[in-house]
Each structure stands twice: as C-alpha cells, then as structure tokens.
Image (cartoon, grey):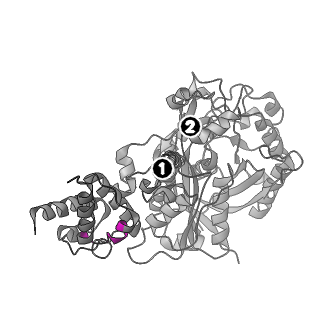
Amino acid sequence: MTIARQEMINQLKLIVDAYTENKTALEQINEQTDFIKDLNINSANLVDIVLDVEQAFDIEIDNTSMERMLTVGASIAVIEEKLAAKKPD
Amino acid sequence: MPRRVVITGMGVVAPNGVGLPAFRTALRLGKSGIRQQPILEQLQFSCRIGGKPELDDVLMASYLTPLELRNFDSSGILYGLMAAVDAWKDAGLPMAGEENPDWDSGAIFGCGSSGVDKFRSSIYKIDALQTRSLGSTVVAQTMSSGISAYIGGKLGLGNQVSTNSSACTTGTESILMAYERIRSGKAIRMVAGSTSDSGPYIWAGFDAMRVCTFKHNDEPERGSRPMSASASGFVPGSGAGALVLETLESAVARGAKIYAEVVGGHINSGGQRGSGTMTAPNSEAVQRCIREAVLDAGISADAIDLISGHLTATTKDVTELENWVTALGRSGKKFPYINSLKSMVGHCLSAAGSIECVAAVLQLHEGFIAPNLNCEDLHPGIAALVDPEMIPRQLISRPVRVVAKASFGFGDVNACIIFKNHQPV
C-alpha cells in the first residue's frame, strides 16, 4: 500500500470517528471496511461523511459517485478520481 | 373499567429554573426568569424582554451525543428532550435496552413549530443553491414531530409516539391525550408535555400583532403582569415541561413516587363563533370546557383549591376570571386561590401548558400556593369578582387537594385538566 493511500485511510478514519460508536471496529479500519455493516454508521449519516470528505479534500462529489462510497476503498477511489480531475496537468 | 392514571415523574426547562429542583425553588420564591434580550433590541422589536432557559454546553452534552450536537440548532427539541429525559429518570424508569423498544410506553409531546433557527439557516443555504450540502438532520430538526421522535429514540419507546399542536393549549392538551390513552388501556405509561423554541423568529409574529408588552423594556422582571390593572400585553417565553403519566396499578407495583392523580379534563373549541375568533376565545366554550372537566373528574366545583390560570397579562385576563366565576359558580371569598406562572416566566406559548402543569402538580404535591408577581395593582374588574386574598402575592403554605389548570390557544381552542392529591391507599 502506498503511503498516500494509508494517509487517506487515516484521514477518513478521523472523519468517520464522529459517526460511529463502534470504536473497536474503527481501530481496524482498512480498505475493505464497510461504513454501515462494519462501523454501524446510520445510513442517513453517509451524506454527512461525504460533505466532510468534500471539505477535507477540497473536492466536489457528484450524486453518482456518492452512491459508490459505501466502503473505505470505494471512497478512496472516488477521492482519487476527483483529485486527479482537479489537477490541471 | 377505565384505568386510574397518576403522575410519577416530572421534568422542566423553564426561564426561571432548569431542572425540577431549581424550578421548584424559583416557584416558591417567586423568582422571575424574564430578562432583557439584546437580540430583540438589535432587531428593533417593540418588546425587548423575554423568557429563555439558561443552558450551557456541558449540560447540553449530557443529553445529546457529540454527533447529535453537530449542526444542531433546534432549541425547542433540546428543551423538550431534556425535560422528557429528566421526567423519565425522576419516575425511576430505565431507558429501553439496545435491542427492543418498550412496547407499553409512548410519548405525546407537543410543539407550535419546530427548529425555527435550523429552518432559517437552511432556507439561506437553499437560496444560495447549497441544498446538496444541508446535511442529514434538517428534516428531523424541523418536522413538527421532531420532538417526539427525539424523545422516542432516546427512551426507546414502542407505544404511540406523536406530536400534538394546538397553539398555547398544546401542553395541557398533550397531558390529556396521554391520559386518555392510558385510561383506555392502550398504554401503561406515556411521557407527555410540550416545548417551544426561543428567540426572535418564534416571537416576531406576536410582536408584530402588538400583543407583547413594550412598556417594560427597562424593567424586565416587572414586565409580565397577569391580572394587573397595568397589564399591557404578554412577555414571550420558551422552554419545556414534561410529565410521566402511568396507570396507578403500574406505579404502585413499581413502588414509584406518586405526585398526583389526573382525575379528568376536557378539550374543546369555540368554533370561532360568538365571541370567539382566531385570536380570542369564545367565553361560552371556555366555561363549557371547565364545567365538562369538573364533571369528567367526578368532583364538585367546590373541591377545587387552586386554579392555575392561563392568564397571559392582556385585557383578556378579566374575561378569563369571569369565565371561571361563571363556570364554577364561585366568586368573592368562595373563589379558589388562583395564580399565573406567566408572571414569572412569561408566556411560553406551546410550552406554557406543560410548564404550568408541572408547577400546578408541584404545588399540589408539596402543599403550597406560589405567589403572583406584578399584580400589586390588581385589575378592578377582577377585584370586583374575586376576593383579592385569593390572588396571593406571597407564598402560602397549605394543603392543596385539587387543582384545575386551563390553557387557551389561537384557533379558539381550550383545554382544562384536573389534578388531585393522591392519597396512599
């Protein structure tokens, strides 16, 4: 795993911390972690997580991409796409 | 056979006291919770005083999780939730476990509107084309049933969980609705009560109608003057009151403390006919409501020791006294004691009925009659009907067996409830 990816997981972990009571599962967070199934996050809060991600990475996430963001790995993929699209080069 | 219904827990978030012990002390001492509200001055209101419960972040954090407090901006839901949770704990009841709701317990908890500050900030975002970033809690905080939904979730209630709304009658109505549900055997216990947001966006409509006083901006504690000759409009207030109602059988089986028994009541409307309008009560309906409540309670009108009036500090106070005199057939020295909590907390609007019911039940349970503030110049129209001694300005310690509490609201709606001292069998 690249350092950049691990860094992204750490950033997501910080964001998600506010929305989960399951701190044990949060400690084990990895790319396979499912927000609802593994972290018991209320599905209504997924939209809040996406808003926090937008702010943290200074990106905008469209509704279709948002639908994919159910796991940590899928979220990182979306974030990477949006960051890449943002770069002028 | 209808079930007997008793009150086993109470909670209150009032401008003159947050939590039952503080409120009880304020009530006995006649402590005013009316203060200058700088925001009302900034916004150039006519009335620049109001009643707002004093809370701090530490207290709030003991009722809502950090996640719940994120983007939270609904003072009414906060007040109502605090009062309801306090009442539940006061009744010695546990929160339902993680898995199953408590099927026998429900809530009827009213409000006039919900989360007006949250609604306001959302509207600014929507108009700035930011709907996508409103976050997930706008609906929960601004739906009318937000308050009962928050309470139901905190306590794990599995019976009926509803919000009622009937303007300034809301609080008294909620208790009567909960009473009916238990009496008819559909629930064993209910949290009943009501709440109202604080602040300019709730109070503005009343200020615009010129029904709030603008004559006491420099002396807030003297501003709310029910039954006074110099009453010149109500002082807006806010907060919440909550009562746990439960079958006598359940209360006795649990060994719960019993504050009082709800023995009956009545809810009606004047239909905005006769003297009734959108904003003024039909006196015939008010009298009928009181008489029906007494009848429903199976008591004699002479048994009433104390009236907890609606009495907002407008010219309608005299009319209210006339209605009590006519409905009960009691006047002069034979009139019961009467007081208005609004002299201490202002008119808490949709929360008024429930906060005043908490005050009424405290007086009944502890055997005292709270003072009326600011009626040293009793209105002559009232003095002509009722012996001024029955409108105490000092605390009176004496047994109180039966209290009648009435509330009236916009839409020409009325509610009257009768509380009786519970004698252990």
Q: Name which residue type carries label 1.
A: Leu
Can residue B258 be seen here? The reply is no
Q: Is residue B48 magenta?
A: no
- Front in this rendered view, residue B186 or B135: B135
**Residue plotted at (69% across, 38% down):** B312
Q: For the residue carrying disc 1, how many other residues have a C-alpha within 10 Å: few (<14), some (14-19), or many (20+)?
A: few
Name the front one of labels 1 and 2: 1
**Residue B299: quarter of image:** bottom right
Q: Helix, strand, or loop for circle 2?
A: helix
Disc number placed over residue B200 in the picture, else none: 2
Assign a secondary structure to mark 1.
loop
Residue furthest front as drawn: A89
Give the mark, 1 or 2, whose residue is nearer the N terminus. Answer: 1
Q: Main secondary structure of the magenta part?
A: helix
Residues marked 1 and 2, same chain: yes
Foreground: B37 or B202? Answer: B202
- Most extreme residue toward the right is B274
Q: Amino acid at mark 2?
A: Pro
For the record, the magenta segment spans: A65-72
Can you give x and y, in whole percent of width and height, for residue A81 in the image? 26, 63
Relative to residue B111, is residue B185 depicted above or below? below
Is B330 above or below relative to A5? Answer: above
Q: Residue at x 46, y 75 (%)?
A: B101
Which residue position is annotated with label 1?
Answer: B129
Question: What is the chain letter for disc 1?
Answer: B
